[in-house]
Amino acid sequence: MADIINLLPDNLANQIAAGEVIQRPASAVKELLENAVDAGATEIQLFIKDAGKELVQVIDNGSGMSDTDARMCFERHATSKIRSIDDLFHIRTMGFRGEALASIAAVSQVELKTRRAGDELGTFIEIDNSVIKRQEPCQTATGTSIAMKNLFFNVPARRNFLKSNAAEMRHIVDEFIRVALAFPQLQFSLNSNGQQMFHLEKGSLKQRIVSILGQNYNSKLVTVKETTDYMNIHGFVGKPETAKKTRGDQFFFVNNRFIKSSYLNHAVMNAFTEMIPGDSYPLYVLFIDLDPAHVDINVHPTKQEIKFDDERILYAFVQSAIKHALAQFSVTPALDFDLDPGIQQLDALTQPFTEQKKVQSANTSIYKTFTHANQAHVIDKTSSSNLQHWKELYGEPARPDNDNVPQEQPASTASVIDERWQEAATDHKVPVQVHQQYILSQIKSGFILIDQRAAHERILYERYQKALAEKPMATQQSLFPQTLELIPADALVVTEMLPDLQALGYDLEPFGQHTFVVRGTPADIQTGNEQASIEGLLEQFKHFSNELKHNRRERLVRSMARNNAIPPGKVLGTREMQNIIDELFACSTPNVSPGGRFTFISFKLNDLEKMFERGM
């Protein structure tokens, strides 16, 4: 019987290996940028065409390569970073596996130009599907220029699985930002389809954060800096008011390498306990420096998942450092012992305490209660100190806003309205709001308790779905158009969603780099709240983007429904509550919200009677 085991051809082996390293254009961007950093470059340029499908090019002014090294760098497991197994435990460079360039050459067409500072001529190499087509001397600047063209041209199935240009561009921007944040002392630029998206000058870490995330963070960053013999930590966290519903602005770097660690993220979240809502995430850009011998970065080809020899020490250290920073900058909650300036203006402090006032004060019930023995428990039986205020202990439901009760009116009128409202509250035709969060409505078999936010979210969700499928929603034009300036990553999201946003009632149009003009919003959004509405929608959309089972339109509809749903704590009028009830039960799926939460719970009379009869 013939032998069946064979060695794979180099080009096929390279393609298989490339599947782990180069998953999308952003993967190549990461590898090429990190190579430029390792080459000692001080200026790095990234050029993108067609979201990286047509071109990803990185130009740096680093050390460059000889003609031999230029050819060798495309071989598998060829690297200048390590020479022995001991070197794996002392890695401080970004790359070391020797797979990136070989993987890129296996799935694209590559052109390389490189020259060392002391050489008169550089080297030009052209590679197609791992095969070197041409190598010759050339004139080029000191450093390296590497262009990856027509990604996955030889793997059509992989190319077909790439997302839309806007989605792929977001991934590219994410990788660019991570490398740019890690090295603020270097100059970076990003150009996409001939337009400059970023130009980041050399500077401090804070300047780099503000340049990337926006000027509004300039006064909202808290410095974190702690030093020990085992490890150091430095960077910034955002003040509690910068917390968002998404994890987008969270960056951990270990020895300048971006990592993903849910364990360390939990340490940061614990440090912010009681300062931000449980469903929000703080901004942080944190750098941990420690001996590479305590870290294993050779876990995955992306090198974003690493292992520590003692994670508990890191957890405690990170949490403690952030708490200390927040306390040092007076961000943590503290007791305020300053006297209210308004108290200083009271007559008791500004007017003299005469003998006549002393006598009057001594005759009051309050004075007697606090100065006479055994009087602290005594209840004043006078008519002015009855038990009419018992209602304040339990609180009284807020009156519906459509009753139009004036702030100041004759007592007789107020009492008549109060009686009418109390009668209406017991009428099964009028719903009642409970704790400004739930709506209680009587039905024939008992009553139902409706979660006002979950119910409104379901109503809006089906309304928006209908708008995208059938008739676009009405737009209310703003009296004064607003200019909305976004960070580049968010601008890409809005650009991708623009046609659907317009169908949902938003009148938006691009207005220069990363900027949009807001001329109108859906009719159910309060006028003057246009910018906050879109920013909230963006946060919700990025939150839902983590759920891969939903397409873009579904994520957008869910985001708008959640962003525009009435929040808990809002007082609703009788008509508003009745509208919610009517519209909820006109929905195709009234019993659950889009996210799967119950919108209402029913209570039957039979069950209530059994509950009350248990003690008999």
Image (cartoon, grey):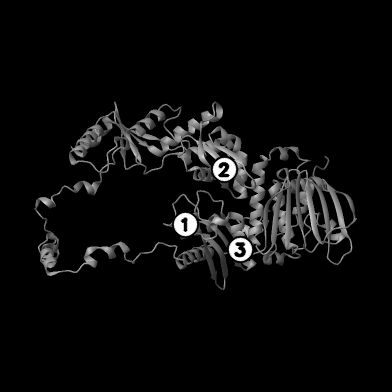
* Secondary-structure class at tag 1: helix
Q: Nearer the viewer, residue 20 or 326?
A: 326
Q: Check disc 1 and report the residue beneath it.
A: 240
Mark 1, Cα crowd under 10 Å, few <14 / some 14-19 / many 20+, is: many
Residue 495 image offset from top left, x and y in percent: 62, 41
Going by the image, does 57 lie left or right of 558? right
Picture layout, residue 105 above or below residue 451: below
Three-letter residue code for mark 2: Ser
The one nearer the camera, 159 or 217, is 217
Q: Residue furthest bottom?
A: 229
Q: Residue at x 65, y 42 (%)?
A: 166
| Nearest to N terminus: mark 3 or mark 1 | 3
Amino acid identity at mark 3: Leu
Left or right of 211 in this view: 27: right
Q: Earlier in the sequence, mark 2 or mark 1?
A: 1
- The N terminus, quarter of image: top right
2 and 3 marks in contact (CB < 8 Å): no
- Between circles 2 and 1, the one closer to the viewer is 1
Q: Which mark is residue 205?
A: 3
Tag 2 residue: 545
Q: Secondary structure at mark 3?
A: helix
For marks 2 and 3 on the same chain, the one whose residue lies earlier in the sequence = 3
Marks 2 & 1, CB-CB < 8 Å contact: no
Q: Horizontal placement of 66 versus 206: left or right?
A: right
Q: CA distance from mark 2 to mark 3?
A: 28 Å
Say if 457 sits above or below 125 in the image. Answer: above
Amino acid of disc 1: Pro
**Residue 454: x %, y % from top left:** 42, 38
For numbered disc 2, what is the local secondary structure? loop
